[in-house]
């Protein structure tokens, strides 16, 4: 794993977003929705285990990010930013089996669930680069709040 290359890719990906101030989780989400021409829905995973932090599902009409109920809002923000980073970096998603899709969507026709990207190996190139980009985005959010004197995370619009 070439960490310098991963840091460089994360830096370039952040710069390519051309985010306008103030930056918040909600503003990044809105930016990605415009860029991808798809709604992004963010929800907690009920009964998540420590093996699943976040999941990104590409459904036929939207992107769905599921996050573990973290111990803090900052933890949830980092999980969501990590999944946003996979979108920004254009990491391919794994095709889901109908059985796996049914685990998370028991009331949804598994054929409607197209793809998913989930963390399984924290040290592979995709995961490291996504986490580095998530860290950069989190730093932008903190810097924006420091300038504006706002609340950490700006979670209200996203988490209610």
Image: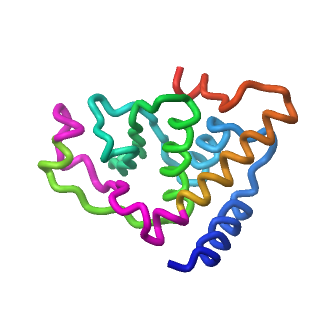
Q: What residue is rendered at 37% in x and 56% in y?
A: 119
Task: State whether residue 48 is above or below residue 18.
Answer: above
Residue 154 % position (x, y): 67, 29
Horizontal and vertical percent position of residue 111: 18, 49
Residue pushed farthest right?
A: 147
* Closer to the camera in the image, 116 or 125: 125
Q: Which residues are magenta?
A: 103-129
In-image side of 55 versus 78 (left or right): left
17 and 117: which one is in front? Answer: 117
Q: Is residue 154 above or below residue 33?
A: above
Give the residue displayed 56% in from the left and 38% down from the top: 77
Residue 14, compared with residue 83, is above or below; it is below
The chosen color scheme is rainbow
Is 128 a magenta residue?
yes
As drawn, is 86 to the left or to the right of 141? Answer: left
Residue at 64% x, 69% y: name it.
7
Residue 124, x across and y down, in percent: 42, 70
Residue at horizontal 51 percent and vertical 43 percent from the top: 80
Point out the residue furthest to the left here. Answer: 99
**Front residue of this view, candidates 101 and 150:** 150
Is 84 positioned to the left or the right of 133 in the image?
Answer: left
- The answer to whether 128 appears left or right of 152 in the picture is left
Report which quarter residue 133 is drawn in. bottom right
Q: Position of residue 159 (x, y in %)?
A: 52, 25
């Amino acid at each position: 794993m070439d960490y310098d290359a991963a840091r460089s890719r994360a830096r370039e990906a952040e710069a390519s977003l051309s985010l306008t101030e103030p930056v918040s989780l909600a503003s990044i989400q809105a930016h990605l929705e415009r860029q991808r021409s798809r709604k992004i829905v963010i929800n907690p995973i009920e009964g998540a285990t420590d093996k699943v932090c976040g999941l990104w599902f590409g459904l036929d009409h939207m992107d769905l990010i599921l996050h573990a109920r973290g111990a803090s809002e900052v933890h949830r923000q980092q999980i969501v930013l990590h999944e946003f980073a996979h979108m920004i970096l254009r990491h391919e998603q794994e095709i889901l089996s109908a059985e796996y899709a049914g685990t998370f969507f028991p009331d949804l026709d598994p054929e409607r669930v197209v793809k998913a990207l989930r963390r399984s190996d924290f040290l592979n190139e995709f995961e490291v680069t996504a986490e580095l980009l998530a860290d950069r985005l989190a730093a932008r959010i903190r810097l924006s709040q420091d300038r504006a004197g706002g609340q950490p995370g700006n979670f209200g619009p996203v988490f209610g």
